[in-house]
Each structure stands twice: as C-alpha cells, then as structure tokens.
Amino acid sequence: MNSSTFAFLDEDAKKEIRRSLLKAVAIPGYIVPFASREMPVARGWGTGGLQITLSIIVESDTLKVIDQGCDGSVNAVNIRDFITSVTGVESSNETSAATLIQTRHRIPEEKLKDNQILVYQVPYPEVLTTVEPDTAKQKQMHGDGDYSKLWVLLYEDTSQYGDSRISNRYPVLVNKHYVMDPSPIPKYDIPVMNNNSALQLFGAGREKRIYAIPPYTDVRPLKFDDREFKVENFSGIACERCGATDVFFDEVRRGNKSSFFCSDTAFCDAQLEKNNAA
Amino acid sequence: MLLDVCNVSKIYGPSCNRCLDLTGSEANRAICPVCNSIVAINSINLTAEHNEILGIVGESGSGKSTLLQLIYQDISASSGTIFFNGLQNDRGTPLNILDLPPSMVSRLKNKEMSMIYQNPRLGLNFLFSAGGNIAERIIGSGERRYEEIRKGSLDYIDRIEMDSSRIDDYPEEFSGGQQQRIQIAKALSSSPKLLLLDEPTTGLDVSVQAKILDLIKELQQEMGFSMIIVSHDLGVINHLTDITVVMKHGTLVEYGLTDQILEDPQHPYTQLLVSSIL
Ligand SMILES: Nc1ncnc2c1ncn2[C@@H]1O[C@H](COP(=O)(O)OP(=O)(O)OP(=O)(O)O)[C@@H](O)[C@H]1O
Ligand SMILES: [Mg+2]
Ligand SMILES: [Zn+2]
C-alpha cells in the first residue's frame, strides 16, 4: 500500500473512475464500464462502492458507512476504518452529519439532502441477466428501451402469485429510459430513490461497472398501469428498542416469537435519545 | 402493396463481382466458381399484397428459409431493398427496411411482422409460460395494463383451441403440435400485417398437421393478414395459398396463381416437382 497517496488509489485510477462517474451521471441509469483495481478487501465485499468513495472523497467530507442499515456491523466498520485511515476524514453515524455515505442494501431513513452523496455497493449490476444471458443482446435491449422480457416476468408472477415475487433488487425505470438494478435494497426503499435530493452512485467491483442517478431524477419501479407497487407491510409494528413506526424493520425470531427493530441503527439511536430527553 | 422485395441477394463467403452472374437457376449452381461463395439468394424480386397468401416451394438448399429470414431481418442482406407497408420517413421517402436502425427493426418485428419457425425453440422462449410468450408480444406492442395483457393471452389461447387452464404451463409441458399452436398464438397476438411461416408443420403427425393448417387458414380469414409459407408439401401449398413461387439455386423460376402452377407448370423444374407429387 502506498501511504503517501491520499485515499489509497493513485491519481490516474481516480481520474479514470471519475470520468466513468461523469458519464454515468450524464446518462442516468446507464451502465458504464471501469477498470476495477485490486483493493485490500476481498471482491464481493464492496470493492466497487469503495473505489467510487475513494475517488470522490475530499478532506472536508464526513463519512458514514452502513451495512444493511447498520453502522456497527463488522463489514461497515472495516470499510469505514480503512477509508478514514487512508484519508484522515471525519466519520459519523449520524445521517444528517455525513456528506458521503457508503451503503450496502439500504437507504437511510432520514431524508437525504442535496449536499449528500450516497454510494451503493452493487453485486449484480445488469438487470437483464435473468432474462437474457447474451451481453450483446442486453446492450441492444437497453439501447432500444426494450424491457418486454422483464415485463413478462412481472406478468408471470402476477398471474401465478398475484404480485411480483421480487423482494429486493426490484427493477427501476430511471429517467423514463433505462431500467436498472437498484442493488439489493428492499422494495421499501425503492420509492425513496425517486426525486431524491442526493446524488446516488452505484459501484460493482467484481463486474467492473458503475452507474448513477443524479439528484431529482425520476425513478419508478417497473409496474403495470393497473397494479399498485406494494412495499413490505409493517403496519401495526413498532421498534422494540425505540418505539419507531413507519420505518423498515429487521425481524428477529426467537422461538415462535418475532421481535422487530429499526434496520437503520443510527435512526434508532436518535429516536431513543429523543425519547430519553423528553 | 404490403411487401416489395427488390433485387435482394444474400451471399455467404468472401463474394466477388461475378458471384451473381455465375450462379442461379440458369447457371444451374449456387456456388460461385470464381470465389466459392454460396449465393443463397440471387437478385430476387417479389411482392405481396394485403391479405394475400404466398407459398414458396423448391428443393432443399434453394434459399427458401434464407428469403424468409431476410424479410424478417433475422439476417442481413448482401444487397437489395425491401419496402414494407408504405413505411416512409418524415419527408415521405419510402424506407428500405434492410437499412433501418435496430430500434425500428425491433418495433417492426414486435408488431408488424411475425415468424413461425419449424423449430418451436426458435419461436418460443422456453423460460416463459405459454401465456408469458404471448404476453411478451402484447407487451412489445406497447400494452402496460396487466388485465389487458392477461385478457389478450387468454384470448389467443382460446383462438388456438387450447384449454385456458394451460395458460401458465411452460413449453416443455406441451406436445410438438401444441408448441406450434402456441407459436401461432404468440405470433398473431400483436395483430401483425404479415405472417411468415417456415415449414410450420414439418415433423408433426399428418393428422396434427392438417388441424394446424386448418387453424392457420381460419385465423387468416378471421384476422386478415398476409402470409408467406414455405413448404415441401404441395398439398399444403394447394390447400392454403393463392400464389406459388418456385425457387431454385437462390432464384425464382416460376411465379403465378397456385391453381395454374399446379395444373400447368411452365418451368421444367416445376413440372418435375409437380409430377413427382401428383
Ligand atoms: N449461415 C450460413 N452460412 C453459410 N451458408 C448458409 C448459411 N445459411 C444457409 N446457407 C446456405 O444457403 C443456401 C440456402 O439455404 P436455405 O436454408 O435458405 O435453404 P432452404 O431452401 O430453406 O432449404 P431446406 O428446404 O433444406 O430448408 C444453402 O446452400 C445453405 O447451405
Ligand atoms: Mg429451410
Ligand atoms: Zn464470387
């Protein structure tokens, strides 16, 4: 490791990733290839998101890293420690205090602002792989905006199960043209992507792909005109720790009893603090 | 006029400037003696009117499938033009469909034209249910309401005289004849103006063949589309078509009303063909 370089990556690597990012931002939802570097974490552990973060981070940034909503998980801590050690930037668990948030599988509950960037770790960037294995054909389908095969999956689920069976990685139509994989976030988070104030960047290290959603972009789940998009239903449920309702919950099963906790641990902490102050 | 094929050729191989002159029915060969290229289609002119049914006969390797694939643009032509259904640009100039951008080609193939292949694996997506296959075309022609798509699929399952309870079954679960019926349902579900059929019943039991041909004829009379059907079976040609085209070595050797051609063939090759059958 070259410790004299700010943010680990050499300037050429960063420049190249930024160039891919610019292209990705210019064409919302379009997948841009980039030359993924070797990183000191195993591929599949967020190297795509990590490289994006490292190539855009500046000294004045405040960093937050979450894994499935949790700041304290081993993965999140390792990534955060690594980034702060190679940049010296401040970190925070508080969503509103962070300017740069790297995430795996969740969007923070607290509404994001236009000075914030959300970087997603992506395992499978190509939304069409399930219906079309041939990459040349995938490209053609994206170019034509021809997503009828994805619609057929939706048709079949609706016919056979009453609704889509996709629980995460629900395909979204970005800026009314490209359909993209939003990474394995729950359906609950899909509406949050739409018209979001923050810049949303997506990095897949193993697949060497980057894509983006600029702030205030139209993002819609693929759904039939005469069907509702249904997210996970948590009605009547409150967090056992902080009492919050109307958030995305993690379910913890003990025997045949289920307990629910906020999946966003920073949000849960803040709620608890508020409760205690009152 | 629905279809106007002008001077279309398809050469497999390096090709030279003598290929077209030195091959064809008069030269009595399809392989260019200079450069050894295969001239699969040699300077063919052919038209089809609305509602007309054309049959193509000819020996194996004479270019019948190639001609259908060129019209359907499964393959690209070496030279020539094809005009389809008055398709023109903003200034009113007719568009050669062989030069269309890929997005317009897929629109044409999704809606205006359909192909039924001898091998159901080419025409059906075996990962999708029967209804899903039909739905794919309905979706491809722009429908985004689930109920309409489902109704459309059921309607075409009904039209091919299949029990509606089988709509969600997958292609492997059907017999060869049923798979051909599903192909027909899929092909017609976008109400195309032209249906291309490449030996749609070859390989099926004779009794099954007859039923499928009757079905095709019924649907054609009911829906009113044009057809070009390739068959080795002059009985099929006689039963179904208005016009018969005879091909040899990539060229047309005879074109005329089916009744006349079968009763009074002009070209020696056609005479041979007819006498060997009748
Ligand atoms: N991909 C290809 N590469 C090279 N030659 C080809 C290719 N496809 C077809 N040909 C040749 O083009 C000629 C016409 O083939 P085509 O399949 O159109 O014949 P056909 O009339 O449909 O024959 P059949 O009755 O046996 O189906 C043949 O000589 C064939 O070998
Ligand atoms: Mg053939
Ligand atoms: Zn030649």
Image (cartoon, coloured by chain):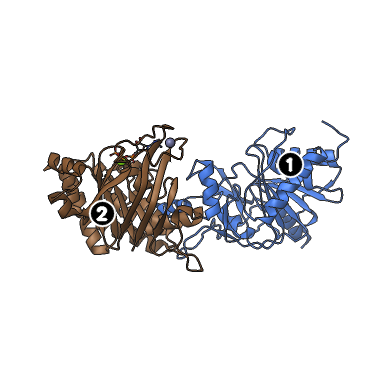
Q: Secondary structure at mark 1?
A: helix
Please name the residue shown 14% across and 39% down the image: B276
Q: Nearer the viewer, residue B68 or B26?
A: B26
Q: Seen in the image, is B161 located left or right of residue A221?
A: left
Ligand 2 found in image quarter: top left
What hue does chain B carry in this figure? brown
Quadrant for the C terminus of chain B in the image: top left
- Circle 2 marks a residue in which chain? B
Question: Residue B127: x percent and y percent?
Answer: 40, 43
Residue B256 drawn at (x, y percent): 22, 54
Q: CA distance from mark 1 to mark 2?
A: 60 Å
CA neighbours of label 2 inside 10 A, class few (<14), some (14 to 19), many (20+): many
Please name the residue shown 37% across and 34% down the image.
Answer: B31
Q: Is mark 1 within 8 Å of ligand 1?
A: no
Residue A144: horizontal and vertical position, in percent? 52, 54
* Three-letter code for the amino acid on which mark 2 is drawn: Leu
Tag 1: amino acid:
Gln
Say which quadrant the N terminus of chain B sits in.
Answer: bottom left
Residue at 53 percent across and 43 percent down: it is A136
Q: Secondary structure at mark 2?
A: strand
User: What shade has chain A been given?
Assistant: blue
Give the percent coordinates (x, y) of residue A276: 76, 58
Residue B124 visible to an observer of this rendering:
no
Circle 1 packing at 10 Å, graded few (<14), some (14-19), many (20+), is many
Q: Residue furthest bottom?
A: B91
Q: Residue at x 77, y 39 (%)?
A: A13
Residue B54 is tagged as 2
Q: Quadrant of residue B22?
A: top left
Left or right of B9, for residue B99: right
Per the rendering, the mark at residue A51 is: 1
Q: Nearer the viewer, residue A15 or A207?
A: A15
